Amino acid sequence: MVLLDIRELKVYYHSRIRGIVRAVDGVSLTLDRDESLGLVGESGSGKSTIAFALMRLLPNYAKISGKILFDGINLLEASEDFMRSIRGKRIALVPQDPFTSLDPLMRVGDQIAEAIIAHNPLMEKEDAKKLALEALEAVGIMKNRANDYPHQFSGGMRQRALIAMAIALKPDLLIADEPTTALDVIVQAQILDLLKDLKKKLGLSIILISHDISVIMQVSDKIAVMYAGKIVETAPSLTIAESPVHPYTKALIRSVPNIDTERQVFEAIPGQPPDLTNPPSGCRFHPRCPLAGNKCKTEEPPLVKIGEKHYVACWLYAKR
Amino acid sequence: MSMISSKIGSLLKFGSSAYMLLIGVSIIITIVVLSIIAPFICPYSPTQRVGPAFSPPSSTFILGTNSIGHDVFSRLLHGGRTVLYVAIISTLMSMSIGIPLGMISGYIGGWPDRFLAVIMDAIYSFPGIILAIAIAAMLGPGNIFNIAIAIAVTYIPTYYRMVRGQVLSIKSTPMVEAAIAIGAPVRVILLEYIFPYVVPVIVVIFSMNIADAILTEAGLSYLGFGVTPPTPDWGYDLRSGQPYIVNAWWISTFPGLMITIAVVGFSMLAESLNELLSPKLRG
Amino acid sequence: MIMTIPMVLLLLTIIFFVLRVMPGDPVRAMVGEKASEEQVRRLREQLGLNKPYIEQYFDYLAGLLRGDLGVSWYYRGMPVTSLIMEKFPATLELAIGGTIVSLLLGILLAILAAYNQGSKIDRAVTLFGIISYSLFIPWLGILLQLLFSVNLKILPLNTRIDVEYVPTKITGLYVLDSILTGNILGFVNALQHLILPSITLGLVLTGSYLRITRNTMVEVLSQNFIKMARAKGLAERDVLFKHALKNTLIPLLTMMGLQFALLLGGAVLTETTFSWEGMGRFLVKMIEFRDYPTIQGIIIFYGLLVAVVSMIIDIMYALIDPRVRY
C-alpha cells in the first residue's frame, strides 16, 4: 500500500545574488508502508532538500512545485496547522548533525517529552515523561541518563536520543538525514543496526539519506540514486548491488573500498558536482561520464523501466 | 585598485548598508561644512546680545533668541565648531595613544602587557562620562583642550583592546612567525603584517568614537564641566534653555536636535562601515 | 572577578592624587576669603591636608580597610558612607526602572528583527537602534517632559515623589517602600514619577545593545536545534520562546554586564535632567564643592558597583548555562 507518492517535485531557490538554483528538478518517487528507501548522492544532489520539502521546512525563498501525496493527502497544499500536526507525529526527522540538533539548555528527556506534549496537549507531564523514557530505552539509553543535558552525551548517544525523539510518537514515516555522517565507523554500525531493529519492531517506513552507498545498502529495501537534482536510477537494493546500470551508480559502488580484495585502486569520480544555477545541458552527468555520447550532451534522458522495479535515466538504456 | 572596485561592487549588493553609509556621510559633510562656513554665513555673532531675550523664531531670528538675547541659529552653527573640534581632537588623541600601546603591548606580551591590560580594563569598565567629569573637573574649567583630554582618556582603552586583540590573534599565525624567523625587524612586522588587518577595525571605532565624543562633550557641558559661557556649545545651550522650556521651547530643542543628528550621522557611518567591512574580513 | 581589587585601587589612586593637584584650594574655599591665615592653617591641619601626599594616601587606605570612607567636608562631620547610602537607593530605583524598560523594548524588538531577518522590519529596527542610541539624554528627557508633563499633563515633571507621599524608609526605594508599608497613594505617586526618567534612560540603553541582541538572535534562530524544534511539530511560539529566547539570554547577560557602565553614566545625566536626587547628581554637586572625601568615596563606590555587578553576571551565567556547571 502506497504511503508516499512524490510526483514531479521541483524545488527552486530564488537568490538575488546567484540566480535560480534548481536543487530538485523533477523527482518522482513512491514508498510503500513498511518499505524503506535509500536516497544516495553527492552533496548538493538534492537529497536533503527532498526531505525538507516533504515536511515543508524549507525557507521562504524556496519555490516548490509538484505533488507530494502522503497517505493520499497532498502535503504541498495542506495548511500550516495540518503540517504541524504531522511533523513529529506521522513524519519524523532524524537530523544530520547530532552535535547541534539538541537545545543545549534543556534536558534530553524533557526535549523528547516536549515533542510528545506538543501533539498531545491534554496529556499529563508525567505520562509524557514516561513515554519519553520508553523511547530512550528502545534506542538503548538508560533511564537515568534522561535528565542529563546534551553536552553530557557522546555523539553516538545524541544521535540515538534524536532517533528516540523521532520514534516517540510512533510515526508512519521516518526520515533519517545522513544519520551516520558525523560519527565514527563503529558507532555508525550501531546506529544502522538500531534503525534496522526499529524498522522491524515498529513497522516503520524509512527514508534514509546518505552520500555513502554502503550505509544505504544496509538498511534500505530500495534505492534511488540522485544526481544534480534528478533521479538517475532506482531499483531494489539487491538489484543495485548486483547489477547497477547507470554509470554514476556504478562509479559510486566502485568507490567503496572492499576489504576482501588484495589490491585497491581508488576510483574517484572525476570532475566536480555541477553548478545548479546552470546545470549541464542534456544528461547532467555527461561531463563526468566515461561513456558519454553525443546525444547525452544535448538531450536529457527520461527515466525508463529496464527491469522488475528497475528504472534508469541513461541514453545507453533508453529505448529509442 | 581592484579592492576598491570590488568594494563598490559589493556595495550594490548590500543595499541597506550602502544607504546608511550615504545618509551618514551626507549628514557628516553637511554639519562639517556648516561649521566651517559658520562665521561667513551667520547673520549675527553668537556671543553678542543682538535682540530681546526669549524671542520666538521669526524672520529676524530664524530660531529665536535665548535667555540673554543671543541668536539661537548663530549659536547653533558656531556650536558645531566647538563640538566637532573637541570630538575630533579627543579622538585623535585617543588613537595616537591607544593604538600604539595596543600594538606594542600585544606584540611584546608577558608581564608589561598583562599589567597594562588590567589597567586598561579598569578604565574601560568604568562609566565613561563619570571618568570624564572627574578629569575635566581636575584639569579646570573652560579650556576646550582640557575637555578633549578628558574625553580622550575614556576612549583610549577601546582602541587598546581592539588593536591588542587583533595583534594577539595575528601574532601566532605562521605568516608572522616566518617573518620573525627570517629576522624581520619588529617595526616592519608591526607595520606591514599586523597593521593592515587592524585598519578596518580602527576605522569603525573611529566613527563610533566621534559619535560618543560628541555625546560626552555635550554631557560635560550640560553638567557644567565643559565649556564656559559665552562659548557657543550645544550641550551648554540646552542646559541654559531648560528652565524656560515651557515658554521658550526653542532654546533647548534645537541644540538637542543638532546633537542627535550629528551623533546619528557618525553612528550610521560606523554601523554601515561595520557591515561592509566585516564580511570582507571573514572572507 | 579578582580584577576588582586592582581596578578599584587604581581608580582610587588616580582620583586621590589628581584631586590634590587640582587647581584651587579647597580649604580656602571652605572658610572663605575673609578668614585669616591662622584659621586656614588650623583647618588644614584638622583635615590632615598638611601632611605629605603619600601619608595622606596611606591613611586613607588604612581607613578603607576598616570600611571607613572618611568624613565629608561640605556636610561637616557626616560620614561619607552614610551619605552614599542615603543617595544610592534613588539611583538604584532609576537603574531598575531603566533596565526594565530597555529589556522589554530591546528583547521584543530584537526578536521582531531577527525573525524577519533582512526585511524592512529588520532594517527599521536597526535604524531605531541607531537613533535611540544617539539621543542626547537631557534632550530626550526635556522632550518627554514637554509632551507628557506640560502639554498632556498626565505625568509629573521631575523629582522622585511629591513631598506629602514620601513613604517610611525601609529600603530607600520609594516604589518598594510604599508597597511594603501598604501606602497605595505613595506607590502610585512614586511610580508616576519614575516613568519618564525610566523611559528616557531605558530608551537610550536599548539602542546601545539592540544590534548585538538582534545579531545573536539571528544566529540562534539559524541553529540546527531550532530547525529540529520545528521538525518536531512545535508551535512557532514555543520554538521562539522556549528555545530561541533562552539561548539568546546567555550572550545577552554578558552584554548587559558591559552595559552597566553605560547605565551608571546615563543615570548621571538622567538624574540631572529630572532633578532626581540620586548618586549621580550628588557627585556632580560634590565636585563643584570640591569635597574630596565624598568624591573619592563615590568614585570608589562606583568602581565597586561595577565589579560586583560583573561578579553577579558570572554567577548568573553559571546558573543558567548547564554547560558551565557540569
Image (tube, rainbow, N blue to C red):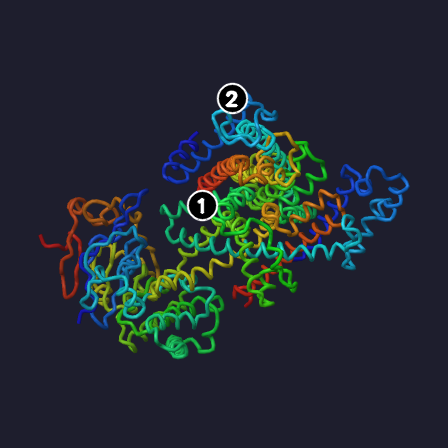
| Residue B156, picture quadrant | top right
Q: Quadrant of residue A26?
A: bottom left
Q: Chain of mark 1?
A: C
Give C48 or B167, whichever is nearer the viewer. C48
Mark seen at residue A2:
none
Name the residue tied to disc 2. Answer: B41
Q: Residue at x 75, y 54 (%)?
A: C80
A266 relative to A65 in the view: left or right: right
SS state under label 2: helix
Position of residue B175 measured from the top left corner of the image (x, y, whole percent): 54, 41
Viewer-side residue, A65 vs C295: C295
Residue A19 position, x and y percent, is 28, 43
Same chain for labels 1 and 2? Say yes or no. no
Q: Which residue does the numbered mark 1 point to in the structure image?
A: C128
Q: Is residue A188 above or below residue C87?
A: below
Q: Nearer the viewer, residue B7 or A300?
A: B7
Name the element at disc 1: helix
Q: Amino acid at mark 2?
A: Ile
Residue at image x 41%, y 52%? C114
- Does the image show residue B211? yes
* Foreground tag (1 vs 2): 2
Q: Residue at point 55% right, 56% down?
A: C97
Residue B202 in view of the camera: no
Judged left or right of residue A68, residue C248 is: right
> What kind of residue is marked 1?
Phe
Q: Chain of mark 2?
A: B
